[in-house]
Image (cartoon, rainbow, N blue to C red):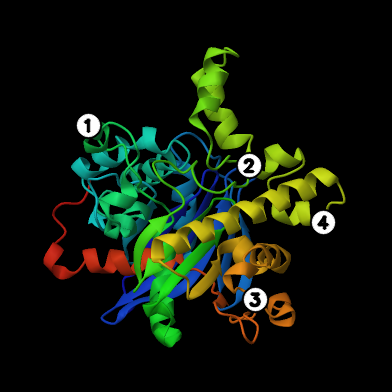
């Protein structure tokens, strides 16, 4: 008898990352993973199975509710993997607010609570809601779970989470939440599994991708992070501004007459590396460019990342290890080198040869700080959390109607 199958959905603003897992008593076993770029027409499902990559053309259009896309994708996966028993779907949901402290079974009530948080993350949260509703529409008996990026950071103290605003606003939920929690949870687990005492110490993990943030870890727990109330905060990203004097927004609205919708669009979609360079938000293109604006963008990125690492080291009262992860962190040695060069005063030194080959340990002999490159796996965390929620004691009677 074939094992029941769990699908994981990890949405970006215009992409869907997919994981296919068999569920057994020892936990989820990955069968394959893939992605769909919703901005590409026609749509293509890029799937990796047993190390072999393939591309499957989809005829569905990425319409408003995604029903046709998910229906075609589920049909193809069922036929390809001979899956007769896709029993559940686990979703990455970026924002859980103060309501969600861990993974949860999705019901009509919890979906409403997730949807209510869209104003706090207009970039990702709507995509998660669309996917959940699409699966519920097509497979109404399928159980679904949500794993929240914000939940991992609930171990932070109120001292770290407060803004210097009236206390009543903190009580209303205006506070540091932190994001990329599923990635940091995987990194904390991987350090504990494979890197001895490193995970017990003071670690700054740098999740550097098109969305980027950093997290201070102590004993595997989140103590501080660069993103705060929204996914705009912290370091510059592909198209997002990072930390910004709120007086700039007041000036844009009151003095320049910008609408708040225009401000939102510029801060989320036209700023960051794209805004600085005027070329691209993709660091690979910027690294290949000879234009001085590209260098300006990369220099500012490295400077701001290194400054944030130093700030997080202050929260930890020191720094034992630095971990690079996600697309930029895992694959772009020149950016890692530029960041670490800014941190030489802190005792961070890397081996150029190890760095150039993306080796796991890239710190040089004599470095006071261990420097690692660890691939993240958010889909694995989603699958593990979904399996914990879907244990027999949770039953099946509360799934979305």
Determine which residue is flagged by label 2. Answer: 272
Q: Nearer the viewer, residue 245 or 279?
A: 245
* Residue 21 higher or lower than 259, as above or below: below
Q: Tell me the element at label 2.
A: helix
- Residue at position x 53%, y 55% in the image: 308
- Residue 46: give x, y in percent of width and height: 60, 60
- Residue 202: give x, y in percent of width and height: 42, 72
Q: Nearer the viewer, residue 191 or 349?
A: 349
Determine which residue is flagged by label 1. Answer: 168
Alpha carbons under labels 2 and 3: distance apart: 27 Å
* Residue 79 higher or lower than 249, as above or below: below
Q: Earlier in the sequence, mark 3 or mark 1?
A: 1
- The answer to whether residue 332 is left or right of residue 21 is right
Determine which residue is flagged by label 3. Answer: 349
Q: Earlier in the sequence, mark 2 or mark 1?
A: 1
| For discs 3 and 4, the disc positioned in front in the rendered view | 3
Alpha carbons under labels 3 and 1: distance apart: 45 Å
| For discs 2 and 3, the disc positioned in front in the rendered view | 3
């Amino acid at each position: 008898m074939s094992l029941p199958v769990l699908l994981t959905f990890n949405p970006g603003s215009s992409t869907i990352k997919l994981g296919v897992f068999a569920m057994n008593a020892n936990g989820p076993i990955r069968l394959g993973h893939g992605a769909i770029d919703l901005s590409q027409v026609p749509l293509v499902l890029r799937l990796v199975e047993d190390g072999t990559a393939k591309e499957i053309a989809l005829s569905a259009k990425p319409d408003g509710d995604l029903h046709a896309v998910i229906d075609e994708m589920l049909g193809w996966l069922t036929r390809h993997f001979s899956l007769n028993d896709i029993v559940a779907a686990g979703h990455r949901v970026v924002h859980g607010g103060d309501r969600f402290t861990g993974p949860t079974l999705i019901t009509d009530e919890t979906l409403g609570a997730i949807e209510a948080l869209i104003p706090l993350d207009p970039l990702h949260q709507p995509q998660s809601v669309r996917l959940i509703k699409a699966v519920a529409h097509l497979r109404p008996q399928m159980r679904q779970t949500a794993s929240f990026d914000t939940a991992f950071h609930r171990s932070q103290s109120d001292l770290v989470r407060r803004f210097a605003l009236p206390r009543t606003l903190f009580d209303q939920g205006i506070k540091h939440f932190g994001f990329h929690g599923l990635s940091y949870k995987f990194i904390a687990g991987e350090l504990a599994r494979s890197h001895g005492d490193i995970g017990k110490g003071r670690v700054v993990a740098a999740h550097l991708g098109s969305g980027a943030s950093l997290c201070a870890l102590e004993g595997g727990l989140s103590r501080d992070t660069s993103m705060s109330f929204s996914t705009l905060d912290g370091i510059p990203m592909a198209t997002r501004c990072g930390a910004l004097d709120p007086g700039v927004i007041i000036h844009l609205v009151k003095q320049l007459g910008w609408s708040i919708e225009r401000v939102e669009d510029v801060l989320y979609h036209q700023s960051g590396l794209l805004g600085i360079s005027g070329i691209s938000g993709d660091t690979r293109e910027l690294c290949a460019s000879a234009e001085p604006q590209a260098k300006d963008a990369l220099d500012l990125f490295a400077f701001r990342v290194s400054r944030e690492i130093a700030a997080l080291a202050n929260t930890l009262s020191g720094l034992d290890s630095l971990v690079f992860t996600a697309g930029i962190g895992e694959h772009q040695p020149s950016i890692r080198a530029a960041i670490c060069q800014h941190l030489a005063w802190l005792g961070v030194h890397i081996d150029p040869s190890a760095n150039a080959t993306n080796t796991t340990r890239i710190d040089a002999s004599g470095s006071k700080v261990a420097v690692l490159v660890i691939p993240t796996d958010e889909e694995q965390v989603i699958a593990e959390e979904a399996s914990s929620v879907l244990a027999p004691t949770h039953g099946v009677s509360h799934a979305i109607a």
